[in-house]
Amino acid sequence: MLTFSIDKSLTDSKARAGVITTDHGVIHTPIFMPVGTLGTVKGVHMHELRDDINAEIILGNTYHLYLRPGMDVIAQAGGLHKFNGWERPILTDSGGFQVFSLAANRKLTEEGAHFRSHIDGSKHLFTPENVVDIQRIIGSDIMMALDECTPGTAEYRYARKSLDLTKRWLERGWEHYKATAPLYGHYQAYFPIVQGCTYPDLRREAAAHVASLGADGNAIGGLAVGEPAEVMYEMIEVVNDVLPEDKPRYLMGVGTPINILEAIDRGVDMMDCVMPTRNGRNGMLFTPEGTMNMRNAKWAKDFSPLWPDGPSIVDRVYSKAYVRHLFASDELLAMQIASIHNLAFYLWLVRQAREHILHGDFHAWKEEMVKKLGRRL
Amino acid sequence: MLTFSIDKSLTDSKARAGVITTDHGVIHTPIFMPVGTLGTVKGVHMHELRDDINAEIILGNTYHLYLRPGMDVIAQAGGLHKFNGWERPILTDSGGFQVFSLAANRKLTEEGAHFRSHIDGSKHLFTPENVVDIQRIIGSDIMMALDECTPGTAEYRYARKSLDLTKRWLERGWEHYKATAPLYGHYQAYFPIVQGCTYPDLRREAAAHVASLGADGNAIGGLAVGEPAEVMYEMIEVVNDVLPEDKPRYLMGVGTPINILEAIDRGVDMMDCVMPTRNGRNGMLFTPEGTMNMRNAKWAKDFSPLWPDGPSIVDRVYSKAYVRHLFASDELLAMQIASIHNLAFYLWLVRQAREHILHGDFHAWKEEMVKKLGRRL
């Protein structure tokens, strides 16, 4: 089973500190989940994720894993945990988002999402039912429902129609989830996703529909897809007023360190984003005092450690000058160091948030942090 | 000081097990030295090199470090050890080899090697004297003399002229070495290099000249540069008959696992090569039973560990199928795993060689290993 208990709630904030228990171990919330697109968090070893970054759960992308290595390989391996050696919880998305952002010739019908592979052009169909089957084969601890991720700039009429389709798909997926069993002996939860674009009435309706299922946890999708941050925050508030308090809330694909803290402040428990690894590979390092562009010549002779009392070994043993040299020379190690550092920073940030929730001063601490996190050093 | 002691010699082989002691620690010979071109062994963290691969010494390339990050940065850092955080011994080449293989508009004169940077086209000059000064700034434990690396296919007349220049450069470099002092308080040795192409008389003459200096160690250069392997082995024998027994012998830039064992059998103590990391990045893994091309579909469903009782964590936790998937998906982690695995294998191979020398059965063991190492699995 997947259970959720709340250790502490606050009066001046919707933030809460909780614990999710899965068959692959516990997750302390609020939590950030590194993205392991193809069964690997880019540039990071599994033992680094576990022992140095202290990730408690990672993501896999159903769309990517379905195409490569493919379901026959994952099935023969005995699921993704066995295939990639990650023994802690795994969450998989439904693949819908990548169909829209990556695949060619995609087309939605009542049946599902038709698309061609971005790799070899082969034809495929994702349905609410078969993405449950695929995630059963992957063996993720938390599976996601197939939905249409409505663009943040969609007009009301389109958003209305899109939500109706997402709701029908959700009901089909939920029935199929209940009618199927795990393949590897461990429990798999199924999270429905609240869509509704930037329209409060649609968001409320979607949240009520999602809440009515009584799933183990609920997700908020379709945010950070083009709308202003303030609108995203407003939508989180609208949705979290409706979603049940006693189930974890997962904000999908968000975001900057500031977004993370603002979402926690509004009652979000789980988040994921490619930003720490993707921006890291481009030379951007997040720190408690703001961001550093490591390609900048200003670091060329700064021999101080990246972050002297930082949580990761890379923070303490490598200097800014050395990392700047590695980026200037396009060395692989530059991307490795930046990816580990940024993930360790994101995990540090949510652990700090949790400590401050438990201590009761989260809101004041968040206000101070938000002033610093957006600076460019 | 740099000292060398021999723990064991053999009667049926020139192989010997020894210990080199430097101010940054001891090196057990025969040893393989991972190449850290720009102050980083590509794709590998310093702590992985130290704790997992168990490298006892790494290389830096003077040409590369001189251009990036440049001598002002290295000097302000307090040398390469401080800059990159590697606390064990470092050996640097003289930069001559890269001038010929990488730089544009290179030209040799009596004074030295004129070249333009392959990065920005800027003009530079390496002389026997200033490459000592540069390596003093880098602070390597073992510095190398500037030489002309004669192509393996050179005619006698050219090889003769080239060796004469190398000998004059060596005398100038040696004088400058003796006239200068370390900058950081630790001892720096200076190894002369035997050239002479594939001509036994030139090789003997060069070895005698090199031996006459009484340096802390001696190197054999200009091999594995186009000549057949048998010719390389013959040249090693010719040279090692002349080089002193009581000083370490370093065979530069060699080679395959078989080359490594054949060189050890002929009295070589130190080797380096980019092959484990470069071939690793392309998907080739070396094992005791032969090589594996990890892009090959034959590994797609082989869920056994890379090397179940291998020396590195990557050998034991990642399966062939997973690594094959990472290469097929062009994931960074593929290159990281292959680089670590191959370096750990090379270090395992020389440790095994040392054990068999101590045990007295090196030659027979080598004959068996050579039959297997060249196979394609």
Image (cartoon, coloured by chain):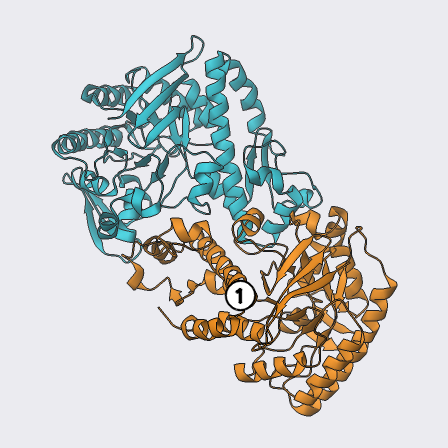
Chain colours: A orange, B cyan
Q: Image height check: is A13 above or below B304?
A: below
Residue A7 lies in quadrant? bottom right
Q: Tell me the amino acid under the disc marked 1.
A: His
Q: Tag 1, which chain?
A: A
Residue A9 horizontal/vertical position (percent) = 62, 71
Q: Image height check: is A145 above or below A182?
A: below
Residue B167 horizontal/vertical position (percent) = 19, 28
Q: Secondary structure at mark 1?
A: helix
- A101 relative position to B205: left or right: right
Q: Nearer the viewer, residue B119 or B85?
A: B85
Mark 1 crowdedness (10 Å alpha carbons): few <14, some 14-19, many ≥20: few
Q: Mark 1 highlights which residue?
A: A359
Residue A153 lies in quadrant? bottom right
| Residue furthest top in the image | B11
Can residue B117 be seen in the rendering of this structure? no
Residue A61 horizontal/vertical position (percent) = 66, 62
Q: Image height check: is B229 above or below A348?
A: above
Quadrant location, the N terminus of chain B:
top left
Can residue B134 be seen in the rendering of this structure? yes
Residue B224 horizontal/vertical position (percent) = 39, 32
Q: Nearer the viewer, residue B145 or A71?
A: A71
Quadrant location, the C terminus of chain B:
top right
Identify the residue at horizontal 56%, vertical 83% (top origin). Answer: A227
- A193 relative position to B128: left or right: right
Identify the residue at horizontal 27%, vertical 19% (top origin). Answer: B204
Q: Image height check: is B250 above or below A266?
A: above
How many circles with numbers are drawn on the protein? 1
Q: Nearer the viewer, residue B286 or B7?
A: B7
